[in-house]
Structures are given as structure tokens and as C-alpha cells.
Image: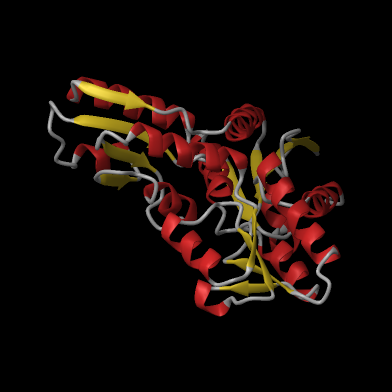
Amino acid sequence: MEILRAKTAGFCMGVSLALQKLDSAIEHSRGRRICTLGPIIHNPQVLTDYEARGVFCASSPEELGPGDCVLIRAHGITRQVEEAVRASGAQVEDATCPKVKKAQLAIRRATENGATLLLFGEAEHPEVRGLLSYAHGLAHVFGSREELAGLPLAPDGDYVLASQTTQDRGAFAAIEQDLRARLARLAVLSTICDATRERQEEALEIARKADIMVVVGGRQSGNTRRLADLAAQCGKTTFHIEEASELRPENFSKKMCVGLTAGASTPKKLIDAAQSWLEALP
């Protein structure tokens, strides 16, 4: 059986930088407690490894105090929460993905005149909550064109369109087209990162060639779920797994070509394990 493995599968730049900062904090802890505020990335195996190394995952700023070293998660946090973290007296290391930080600041600048933010993303995702906190005026979050169509928007109002950094670029382009037909004044921010675009394009290319798709990554990872969704939209049976042990041989019977990709927070060892499992099939 042929295996088409995506070259872009695995850690993106933002995830790699965040984990490098966490590793450095552990190495130079000097007895301090090393903390993250929420999961630093969305991969349960990585989080388990860091927990075993003594990293504490705090759920709120109230759990932090002087003497702690706390890293802001790769997805970023809200401005209000960051203020509370810094007020705790803990040493703060900002591990926010540079692309997310750029999106936060772009939203802040674009809405300074009170324009309403229209944000394409998952309302409960931590990155989205952080992005919203940078808007000066009103803000609406929507997850689909259908949801956007139901929003009561004033045709002559000032609006800013932005996106969660890991959203589908094609869907965002269609949303922009819809809004330009509805609104007289619309500013559009390019906040979807290149790594997301490259992964999505490669996943689609592989899915068109493969008989079946395997996508490796945390189930809480938005960018991983979107890779699986895109592969499924090509009409191919797609398995979104966190570990190779979830795969079943019977699902690959008589398949000649399998596509393999992974989310931006998936470690190489998990992708390698999935590939090894597939290679061992009779």
C-alpha cells in the first residue's frame, strides 16, 4: 500500500517557539514552579509529557503567585486575563504564536475608530476569545456563512472582517464576498496564517489522490479538525486519530493508497508511529 505523507505535517513555527520557551523555562527554573495558563498547545500527549516534567497547568490567574514562572499559551489569552496574570506577581513569559499576536494587534488598530468586528472562528476557542478582547467596539463571532447571514448588520455601518488564524482560507474568501455585497464599508484583515494555508492545500492535494485519509492530532485542535473536514469534503473516508492505536486494519482492506497528515500541534513521533502502523499492514 502506498502512503502519501504530507511534508507540512507536524509542528508549525508558533508551536515550536512556544515549546522551546517552555523547555527553556524548565531548564532555568532554579526551583521556581513552571506553569502554563491553560494548555500551552492542543495536544494531550505533549501536555502529559510536560506534566510528568513538573509543569503545572493553571486554570486561572488566581492559582498563580510570586515565585512562579508562567507561560502564556500559544493560542494567546484575553487582555483582561493577561492583566490579572501580570498582577499575580508571577514572572510572565509570552509564548503566544507570533501570527496570533499579529492578529490581535491588527484587530486593535482596525477597530480604534469603533468599527464593529466580524470574526470568523469558533466562539469557545481560546484564540478567538483572545482576539475578541482586542476589539474596541462591538464584535460578532460566527462559524459559518449561514450563521453570518443571520446577523443583523447595518448596511451603512463600519465593519472589520478578521478570522481565527487556523480557519479555512476558501471559506473566508467566500465570506468576504458575501459581506462586500451587504456592506458599504468593510475593512478585511488577512489573519489566516501561511502555515495553515499550506497544510490545508497539501491535505486537499493528497486527499484527491488517496483512497483513504488519516489525520493525526488532538481532538481539541481546531486546525487538525479542519484538515480532517477538508479531506472528508473530497469524498474520502477520513480518520482523525490522536494515536496510532486507534486505527483498525479492517478499515484499510483493499485500499491501495492512504494519505497521512497531521495538525500543527502534533509531534513527529506520533506521525511516525501512524506511518509505521500503516506500513506494517499486510
Q: Is residue 79 above or below residue 103?
A: below
Q: Position of residue 204 (x, y in %)?
A: 59, 30
Residue at horizontal 52 percent and vertical 43 percent from the top: 226
Asked where in the image residue 262 lies, by quadrant, the reply is top right
Can residue 186 be seen in the rendering of this structure?
yes
Q: Is residue 197 above or below residue 272?
A: above
Can residue 60 be seen in the rendering of this structure?
no
Residue at horizontal 66 percent and vertical 59 percent from the top: 43
Q: Nearer the viewer, residue 271 or 59?
A: 59
Q: Position of residue 132 (x, y in %)?
A: 37, 48
Left or right side of 151 for 211: right
Quadrant of the rendering where the N terminus is positioned = top right
Residue at horizontal 77 percent and vertical 68 percent from the top: 49
Left or right side of 12 for 166: left
Q: Nearer the viewer, residue 211 or 259?
A: 259
Residue at horizontal 58 percent and vertical 33 percent from the top: 200
Asked where in the image residue 159 lies, by quadrant, the reply is top left
Left or right side of 183 for 160: right
Q: Position of residue 191 (x, y in %)?
A: 48, 33
Q: Is residue 63 above or below residue 192?
A: below
Left or right side of 152 for 74: right
Question: Exactly how many numbered labels are in the figure?
Answer: 0
Q: Nearer the viewer, residue 28 or 183?
A: 28
Instruction: Identify the coloring.
Output: secondary structure
Q: Position of residue 259 (x, y in %)?
A: 70, 38
